[in-house]
Image (spheres, grey):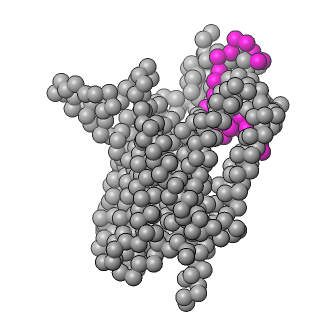
Amino acid sequence: MTFSPSSNKSSSEPPTTANAVTLALVISFAILWAIWIQPHTLALRHIALSLGSLLGLYIIVKNHTLMWSKASIPIYLIGLLFLWVTFHLFFLSSKFDLQLDEYMTIWKRILWGAPFAIGLGIALGEKSHLPGVKGARGGVEHSAIWWIFFAGIVAPTIIYLIRAALMFLASKYGWTLPYFAMLLPSDSTWHIPKMGYIFFCLPALAVACGQFMLLVNQQSHFSLYFASIYVITILAVFFVFYLENTKNGFAYATALCVLMAVIIFLKKRFNWSWRNVAILIVLVSAVVILLTKHVQQNDSWKTLFADIKVATQLEEIDAWKDYGARGLPLNELGKTVSVTNYQRAAYAQVVIKFIAERPLGYGLLYQSFGHFAKEKWPNSVMDTAHSAWLDIMLGIGIPGVFLILLSGVLALKNVRQPSPNVFGGTVLWALLSIFLLMFTTEVARKTYIEALIFMILLAAGIGMGGSRANIRRDVSK
């Protein structure tokens, strides 16, 4: 017996075991993504991981032959990554106790959630229905699965905006809110850093961009409704980044929207109906307004290149070693450098030199840069490189990053070939956004690495399930 979520003869029949398992997996994923960065939710996260992994194992066992297919290579590459990290812990570690702590938390949960991601991917890989697209196939339960999945991706954005709205109303009417309903500063255990919102909200924008791109050419009367949902999602994420005043978020959100626009116009199939034009005008106008306001309140955008130029003078000006405690230098414009511009540029150069010294890695995903720098300059106060890719490369070495990237690229290639489905396209855009933000966002730590590997394995599973679905479609022709 093979697992086939599309085996129902009619949407009026009771759901099969396969469909029930798929639905439970998608609900578990939606809950997990919604709460992954929420404080004080560790127990609930573990419940979602455990349930998802048990159900994922069921699907993997039912589809064990897929584990020997070419599409499963990304999964084995992640397996090699786990072996490499294990080898590094026992034979190459620099801070054994700290590295063991990461091994028993980050890497344990990655292994724990692997069956969840793979099983969910296989289940979704056979889906071909795209809500709102003319000619799409699929039953009622399929639409429900898509919208639950999408709701989970969007949930962190919604939760943030609800908290922001509650705090606005509380200040206006004198309400007293519980901690979980507020956006609290860094000295609170309920605080969520900007990087968390970038990591878990940007994929929602990316997914919405991907789906909007597919919908703009549709003639179905449902198009306007669904396109509006995706436009609202894009604007909601931009608004989160505006309220958080995060430059990284704005930069990558803008880049993804530009990519969407380029793809739309390169395909030359855009439907210039009044509805699509009106939606585009609203989207572009709102984004431009938010971008303008964001740039106005961040002068550091205007001094970006001048600050980077100062940062190239590593030996002559070393304010980067102590976070500017001795004072920050002036740029060629006569202004004090922006600490975020200056440090990111300086740290990148220093970390690259460190990587050349330790190509196999220092050992820690989090703060390898800080520990290594402390060995060279005892008075330095650096911690991370403000770039996840550089932190990971310094932490687990060039081999570790190579395995992550190769696995991710192959998984994304598989979800695109030979004919992608809605979930494959969704994970492709989501992973693309994560890969991008990791260039200048310090997310080389517990939650974010776990989510990164989970999404790669999810993409791999979708590629495996999709390969079977494509074979079935070819046979039925």
Which residue occupies the extreme bottom position in the image? 477
Provide residue 99's location: percent of width, then percent of height.
69, 30
Q: Pick the residue in front: 98 or 249.
A: 98
| Residue in the foreground of this view, choosing between 234 and 272 | 234
Image point (64%, 30%), residue name: 101
Return the x and y of residue 154 as percentages of the image width and height: 40, 50
Asked whether, in this view, residue 1 is left or right of residue 81, the answer is: left
Residue 310 image position (x, y, % from top left): 67, 24
Residue 308 visible (yes or no): no
| Viewer-side residue, 62 vs 242 | 62
Q: Quadrant of the N terminus?
A: bottom right
Residue extending farthest left: 173
Q: Which image quadrant for residue 372?
A: top right
In-image side of 327 versus 167 (left or right) = right
Range shown magenta:
375-399
| Residue 425 location (% of width, % of height) | 52, 63
Left or right for 345, reference 455: right
Residue drawn at (25%, 28%) of the image: 177
Residue displayed at 45% across by 64% down:
22
